[in-house]
Image: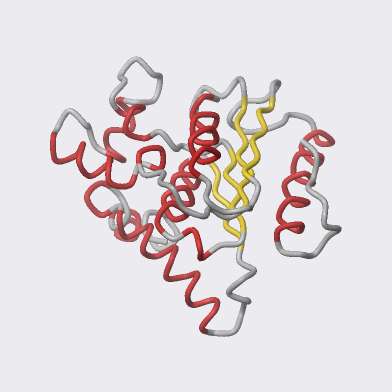
Amino acid sequence: MRGGGERGEPWYLNGKMEHKENSFNDFLAAREALVEQGVSDAQRIAAYGASAGGLLVGTCINRAPEKFCAALLDVPFLDVFRTMQNPELPLTTAEYSEWGNPEEPEVAARIAAYSPMDNIQPQAYPALWIEGSWFDTRVSYWEPAKFYAQVAQQQQGSAPILMRTDMSSGHGGASGRFKAWRDTARQDAFILWALGLSAKTLPTA
């Protein structure tokens, strides 16, 4: 998707600031291409996003929840509007070059239009696994917790909305090889369950 660095600086610039909508449109277009080209079953596509990738996935499931059977949001940046309004947070001012400064009315309107936390609505969301870290200094643990609480309240479907907070990790996840493997296995188990490729029981937190 535009906004990454995979195709050079122009590709990155075409997915940030006033061009941020390109990232969301690209992600949903890629999902459609997987179906149209016969790569994936339309009913068995799961989305994964971590950190700013969680913003991408959070926005897309707000806009088109029916496109995914599940989504996994790992230390996701979801409360963009309020985070960028708070210059006391460690990364806010440095991130003005990525998202813009919401003190400017035009920027505020743009961020509010896609900020996942600000666009939750009553609808049938796919199965969600939302994970935060207690010692995260980049995306505070309360962002995924707030998103979980609001989506769980607005959920109109039967898919589960799950939340896990790692009480000993930071933004980079678990330290130590075996704990990192367990955390990854837990997330993989959720996705396999959502795709119907495992026993019909949810993974335990």
Tell whether 15 sits left or right of 180. Answer: left
Pick the quarter of the image with the N terminus. Answer: bottom left
Q: Position of residue 173 (x, y in %)?
A: 66, 33
Extreme top residue here? 88
Could you tell me residue 144's position as x and y percent? Answer: 53, 33
- Residue 5, percent from left and from top: 42, 55
Relative side of 16 to 122, left or right: left
| Quadrant holding the C terminus | top right
The picture quadrant where one finds residue 193 is bottom right
Residue at screen point 49% across, 29% down: 146
For the point 25% across and 54% down, which residue is it?
A: 19
Residue 187 at what x, y percent from top left? 72, 46
Of 165 and 94, which appears nearest the observer? Answer: 165
Q: Is residue 84 above or below residue 114?
A: above
Quarter of the image holding residue 183? top right
x 41%, y 37%: residue: 117
Identify the residue at image location x=44%, y=37%: 78
Foreground residue among 88 and 156: 156
Task: Relative to 49, say whether 170 is above or below.
Answer: above
Horizontal side of 100 relative to 70 (left or right) equals left
